[in-house]
Image: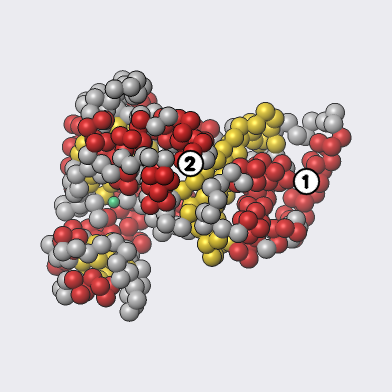
Amino acid sequence: MPNINLNTEEPLIMHIDLNSAFATIEQQSRPSLRNKPIGVTNRISKNCCVIAASYQAKRLGIKVGMPLSEAKRIAPGFIILESDPAKYHYIYQKLIAIMKKYSPDIKMKSIDEGIIDFHSTRSNINTNPLEIIGYEIKNTIKREIGSIVTVNIGIGPNQFLAKVAASLHKPDGMDIINHRNLLNVYQSLKLTDLPGIAEHYQARLNASNIFSPIDFLNATSDTLKRTVFNSIIGEDWYYRLRGFEMDNIQTKLGQVGRQWVLNKPTGENNVLTSALQYLCQTTGKKLRYENVDARGVLVWLNLVGGEGWYQRKMFKTSFYSDYDIYRRAVYLLNQRPAGTTVQAMGITCYGLSKTNRHQISLFDEINKTERLTDAIDIINENYGVFKILSANSLMGDKLIKQKIPFGGTEYFQLLISSS
Ligand SMILES: [Mg+2]
């Protein structure tokens, strides 16, 4: 066995995932639906799809994403309900409250999934083995959320392995992945069982002779970076697979960013750069509003088929103007693999520090940029946002709309912060 350099740290990340959340919540609130094949959709219509299914429905072969007509054909007794966001929001808040009892470092990954980071509380508050705490949380959820609500719990040294662990035994499972059993776990999985690896990346991995998680683990950082992912994302995978935390960039560094969904998925460069420019303008405005400068830029894409790509870079000097952000962002965007069709994109500026731009600059150019940027901000402030845009982004706001992802947390965070 080559030296594979696994992270040998004690696993302190816990991933909690409500099982069949929407369907179970409906069954919890309406006892007559319990033990029945039920599903949830956004709005019932002839062509609607199942967005959540109870375990009884899943056992009959009904899958999430399946058209209602097909589900009815498989199971004539299948009951479909319209989604009830108010109910799910209530459960979401309950889950957050339970998780917060264990650590201030929690993060919701979607409406029914979250992580607890035990690092800061291990020595004083949470001294029990994490498995014991896991069972305690399962019981608390039954008591405080609902008697039929179950969760999968995964414990690992990083967010990635905690999520893998939470997927091993559904429903109501609990697994720990550490450096001792990691190889055994990988041996039991397919590439597409790994969170973040769907068909598109599977094909790219296969093209580099990587057919299993073990092959993936044995690939060099350089192969992953240069051949497979064509991005620093490949290097991140090298460490992520070994249990090192690579998914904390947003919480650790402090960041300002914007994300949008394209109305129509596209791979066209002029459409993407136009959308990107629009994102850079809104991000720049936010940076200046917060009185910070950035040194790092991260550009991410959600591709058709559900996979993601990103590229990031820390720069030597800090920046704050729309143009400086855009120049860097487009440099990163241009490194995306050829032929990708983009569904959503985002930009994050990180490496933030308090701005020094109101000091007199020795360099006239910098002062010019500053004055121009300030002037544009003032005009937009007084006459509505984006009265002044650079020509290329005029197309941008027609092509993109603000992202309110169904499974994402932003919408709910917004509700929470406004209530
Ligand atoms: Mg779930």
Circle 2 residue: 229
Closest to the observer, 51 or 3: 3
User: Which residue occupies 39% across, 55% down?
Assistant: 407
Q: Position of residue 73 (x, y in %)?
A: 20, 75
Within 10 Å of the Cα at label 2, are there few (<14), some (14-19), or many (20+) other Cα atoms? many
Q: Amino acid at mark 1?
A: Asp
Q: Position of residue 20 (x, y in %)?
A: 25, 55
Name the residue furthest bottom: 46
In the image, residue 53 above or below residue 17: below
Closest to the observer, 81 or 124: 81
Q: Is residue 314 left or right of residue 94?
A: right
Q: Position of residue 244 (x, y in %)?
A: 39, 28
User: Which residue occupies 35% across, 30% down?
Assistant: 218
For the N terminus, the quadrant is top left
For the C terminus, the quadrant is bottom left
Q: Is mark 1 within 8 Å of ligand 1?
A: no
Q: Earlier in the sequence, mark 1 or mark 2?
A: 2
The residues tagged by marks 1 and 2 sit, at their Cα atoms, a distance apart of 39 Å
Name the residue furthest right: 364
Can residue 354 be seen here?
no
Circle 1 residue: 374
